[in-house]
Amino acid sequence: MELPLSNSFDQPATTVNVDSLSKNMITVDLSTGELLGSAVQNTVRILRDLQGIFRDETARLAMDPGQPIYRVQAFMPVPEGREGGLFWGTTFIEPGMVGDEYFMTKGHFHADRSRSEYYLNLAGRGALILMDENRKTRFEILERGSLHYIPPHTAHRVSNIGESLLSFLACWPSDAGHDYQTIATEGFSARLRKINGVPTLVEEP
Ligand code: PAN
Ligand code: ZN
């Protein structure tokens, strides 16, 4: 069967055999968020990779440095940095604590501060921590089906505040880029800590 479809995402449409379409096809397991397809890229973050991210460095060093914290799957059909495209990804965060802080992502501003993003939670319970460029920080609860708009000029990170694997889908512009350095040097102005069993946003001194 012949269909007028592109077999490469940034090439003009040509006629291709339908059998070759499966090579570029991505599916999402809607219960877990797992992306399936040969074009999916995977990144794993273990505790060793997260030096300087958690408040309690002594607690981090006492733990297994190989402990998996989170992994990201991404589908990037155009080169990173190209204007006009969109990327799609799933993040999976393990349950656990470092001191009184929940396992969480590194967090970043988009390198192009004007770029925004959507998160859609699929499984588990989390907190999306958002900080604007005036360093005002707040958080939104992620629960199954909750949709979160991350505005421009807003740093974002996610903590797993539940007892099970957290997974959420994300969609962001291909020219957003990731500025991790600002967070590495300045941090967020507040941290989400478990205080008397409750996730509490605590301002940094
Ligand atoms: C997400 C994040 C993902 C991992 O896809 O990249 O959750 O978090 P870090 O990138 O902070 O390690 C996203 O926000 N993309 O723009
Ligand atoms: Zn982002």
Image (spheres, rainbow, N blue to C red):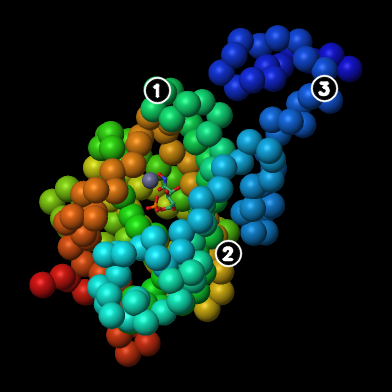
Viewer-proximal residue, 171 or 72? 72
| Picture quadrant where residue 106 is located | bottom left
> Which quadrant is home to the C terminus?
bottom left
x and y percentages locating residue 150 in the rendered image: 35, 47
| Picture quadrant where residue 179 is located | top left
- Say which residue label 2 marks: 123
Most extreme residue toward the bottom is: 196
Which residue is pictured at 30% across the width and 85% down the height? 195
Q: Amino acid at mark 1?
A: Glu
x and y percentages locating residue 8 in the rendered image: 64, 20
Most extreme residue toward the left is: 205
Look at the numbered disc 2 and say if its residue's Cβ is closer than 8 Å to ligand 1.
no
- Say which residue label 1 marks: 83
Q: Amino acid at mark 3?
A: Val
Which residue is pictured at 39% across the width and 22% down the height? 83
x and y percentages locating residue 142 in the rendered image: 46, 63
> Which quadrant is home to the N terminus?
top right
The secondary element bearing badge 2 is classed as: strand
Viewer-proximal residue, 160 or 45? 45
Q: Is residue 123 above or below residue 155?
A: below
Which residue is pictured at 32% across the width and 81% down the height? 59
Real-space Cα distance between discs 3 and 1? 29 Å
Real-space Cα distance between discs 2 and 3? 33 Å
Which residue is pictured at 34% across the width and 77% down the height? 61
- Residue 52's tag is none
Q: Is residue 144 above or below residue 107?
A: below
- Say which residue label 3 marks: 18
x and y percentages locating residue 183 in the rendered image: 24, 54
- Crowd tier of the residue under label 1, counting other residues whose Cα lies within 10 Å: few below 14, some 14–19, many 20 or above: few
Upstream in sequence: badge 3 or badge 1: 3
Real-space Cα distance between discs 2 and 1? 31 Å
